[in-house]
Amino acid sequence: MIDGKAGSAPGTGGAIVSEPLTQAAFAPFGDVLDTEGDPDRLINEGRCGRWHDRARLDFGAEGRAGISLFRSETAELPYRLTLLERHPEGSQAFLPMTEHPFLVVVAGDDGGRPTGIRAFIAAPGQGVNLLRGIWHGVLTPLGGPGLFAVVDRIGPGPNLEEHSLPDPGLVRMQAGKGPRHLRTPRS
């Protein structure tokens, strides 16, 4: 949300208010990866719940799935949003390997430029899968350094576009909506 309204044209310098990460709110941008609700199946003599096929992975005709590990420095809210990026050739899933929440910034596209910027707080135990071509912010762990397994496209051709925001936005926490242990000034 930007100044109480969902979305904003990039470069306006408006306040971006974070939202809790839910499948309904995030659906236009991708998939929330978590274990909410009962598992789809029980395996291993009932000792293991399986939440099955949770992401719309897309690597294109010439790509294949690859798993990379990313380490990112801790950020704090309010967060100065200066850069968005996207991957036109495939989806990209972020699976945290730590118990820290992280900021997920996404936007739609208008003629090759990001529009309608939204911010979500992923709670510990949640990951995301970003659909092909979705503008998104950089990895932004909150509450501690982030280590992520990233599943994305490996293949020929460029698969990264970056867009610097001429007038950065400021992402802040929606009052009363963030994880209790989130590290923010004045929280």
Image (cartoon, rainbow, N blue to C red):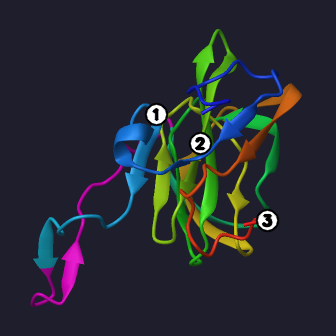
The residue under label 1 is 60
- Mark in the foreground, 2 or 3: 3
**Magenta stretch encompasses residue 76:** no
Q: Quadrant of residue 113?
A: top right
Mark 1: give few (<14), some (14-19) or many (20+) Cα within 10 Å.
Answer: some
Is residue 13 placed above or below 111 in the rendered structure?
A: below
The residue under label 3 is 186
Q: Quadrant of residue 16?
A: top right
Q: Three-letter amino acid code at disc 2?
A: Gly
Residue at 75% in and 22% down: 10
- Mark in the foreground, 1 or 3: 3
Q: CA distance from mark 2 to mark 3?
A: 45 Å
Residue 78 percent across, percent down from the top left: 79, 52
Label 2 residue SS:
loop
Magenta highlight range: 43-62
**Relative to residue 152, is residue 113 drawn left or right?**
right
Residue 156 percent across, percent down from the top left: 63, 37
Task: Report if the CB atoms under discs 2 and 1 are less than 8 Å apart.
Answer: yes
Label 1 residue SS:
loop
Mark 3: give few (<14), some (14-19) or many (20+) Cα within 10 Å.
Answer: few
Q: CA distance from mark 2 to mark 1?
A: 9 Å
